[in-house]
Image (cartoon, grey):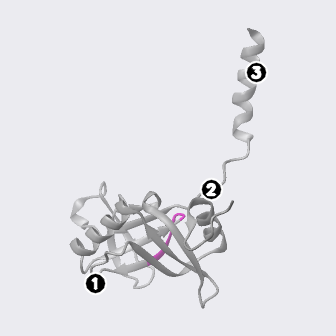
Amino acid sequence: MTRVLATGLLLILVAPFAPAKSKHCTVRVHAQGNENDGSVFATPVTTPISGKNIFIEKIPAISEHDVSAYRPYAASDGSFGALLQLDDHGRLALDTLSVERRGGTLLVFINGRIITEFLVDRRVSDGQIFIASGLTAADIASMQKTWRQIDAKKRK
């Protein structure tokens, strides 16, 4: 009995030093919120491209769970871009956002960083989000671990 307890105690003490599971890509698309919603529902942000001070909703409208595939691109500034293909739930969420939030701003966070902002000016029903630039090689590597690549041949 003491061996079992000693083994259990050893596992508990050693577990924090074990190598962590490789990090997968996180994607969050936040819609522009209302400053009157309060700090529980909205948070102030300065947008990276336009420099506007807006409030965004704390709960993302689209997350990495809504992405089904991606295609990486090399951007002209040396960074990377990507096309994100959404699943049916993500496609519906993007379509709804593009209709209900016309004139508003969407912020795209990849791995915790604001990558780009979109001004909602038309309906988007194709279920695709195009990120022109701003991604690092590490972001692309984490996408490769998380989703299948569009037009990539299946491994045997």
Q: Report the amino acid beneath label 3.
A: Thr
Inspect the magenta stretch and tell me whether residue 150 lies in it: no
Q: Position of residue 106 (x, y in %)?
A: 35, 74
Q: Are marks 2 and 3 in contact (CB under 8 Å)?
A: no
Rendered residue at 47%/68% (across/down): 109
Q: What kind of element bears circle 2?
A: loop
Residue 73 point in image, percent of width and height = 59, 81
In this rendering, is residue 103 above or below 5? below
Callout 1 environment at 10 Å: few (<14), some (14 to 19), or many (20+)? few
Q: Does the magenta stretch include residue 113?
A: yes
Residue at the location (65% across, 67% down)? 141
Q: How far apart are marks 1 and 2 (CA)?
A: 34 Å
Q: Residue furthest bottom?
A: 76
> Which labelled disc corresponds to residue 23?
2
Q: In the drawing, what numbered circle is on residue 7?
A: 3
Mark 3: few/some/many CA within 10 Å (<14, 14-19, 20+): few
Between the residue at mark 2 and the residue at mark 3, the CA separation in whole angstroms equals: 29 Å
Disc 2 residue type (three-letter): Lys
Q: Which numbered disc covers residue 121?
A: 1
**Closest to the observer: 89 or 16?**
89
Residue type, mark 1 in image? Asp
Q: Give the range drawn in magenta.
A: 111-116
Quote the CA–CA distance across marks 1 and 3: 61 Å
Residue drawn at point x = 25 percent, y = 81 percent: 103
